[in-house]
């Protein structure tokens, strides 16, 4: 799972040929740390089907704000440069897999 910054966001997310699940997180966030191994596991399972990236909201507050991120962890699912789904707060792997499949292309 790759950590990106604001400068890489357009290329890594908006211009990606694959759907992208962006994990908006912060180092100090307990639920974010709990979600990290789940995201890593899913990124390995869906390799080649969905790209998984992390964006630290403390290092990119303007970008997080532009997508309405008020609580973390927050996941946004992008497909063809558009937000197609979201999830806020800690979620179990099974719940995230269900959402990925509902959002499509997973």
Image (cartoon, helix red, strand yellow):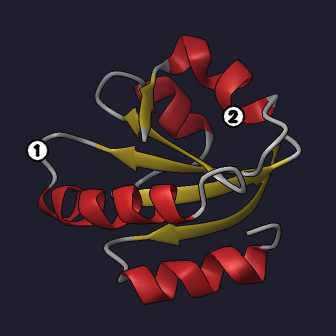
Mark 1 vs mark 2, foreground winner is: 2
Identify the residue at horizontal 37%, vertical 79% (top origin): 91
For the C terminus, the image quarter is bottom right
Classify residue 71 as left or right of residue 33: right
Bin the neighbour count of mark 2 within 10 Å (Cα to Cα): few under 14, some 14-19, many 20 and up: many
Q: Mark 1 points at which residue?
A: 28
Residue projecting furthest to the right = 80
Looking at this view, is 76 or 42 the one in front?
42
- Look at the picture and state if 44 lies above or below 86: above
Residue 13 image label: 2
Classify residue 23 as left or right of residue 12: left
Task: Locate residue 35: give its quadrant.
Answer: bottom left
Check disc 1 and report its element: helix, strand or loop: loop
Find residue 96 and report its horizontal and vertical position in percent: 51, 78
Check disc 2 and report its element: helix, strand or loop: helix
The reply to whether the C-beta atoms of the residues labelled 1 and 2 are less than 8 Å apart is no
Find residue 66 and report its horizontal and vertical position in percent: 61, 36
Looking at this view, is 70 or 95 the one in front?
95
- Structural distance between the alpha carbons of marks 1 and 2: 24 Å
Residue 44 image label: none
Question: Does residue 71 appear anywhere in the picture?
Answer: no
- Look at the picture and state if 106 lies above or below 23: below
């Amino acid at each position: 799972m790759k950590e990106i910054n604001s400068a890489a966001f357009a290329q890594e997310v908006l211009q990606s040929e694959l759907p992208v699940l962006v994990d908006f997180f912060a180092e100090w966030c307990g639920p974010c740390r709990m979600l990290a191994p789940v995201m890593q596991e899913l990124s390995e399972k869906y390799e080649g089907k969905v790209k998984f990236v992390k964006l630290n909201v403390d290092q990119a507050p303007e970008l997080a704000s532009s997508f309405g991120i008020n609580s973390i962890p927050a996941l946004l699912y992008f497909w063809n440069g558009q937000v197609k789904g979201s999830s806020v707060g800690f979620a179990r792997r099974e719940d995230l897999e269900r959402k990925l499949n509902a959002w499509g292309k997973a």
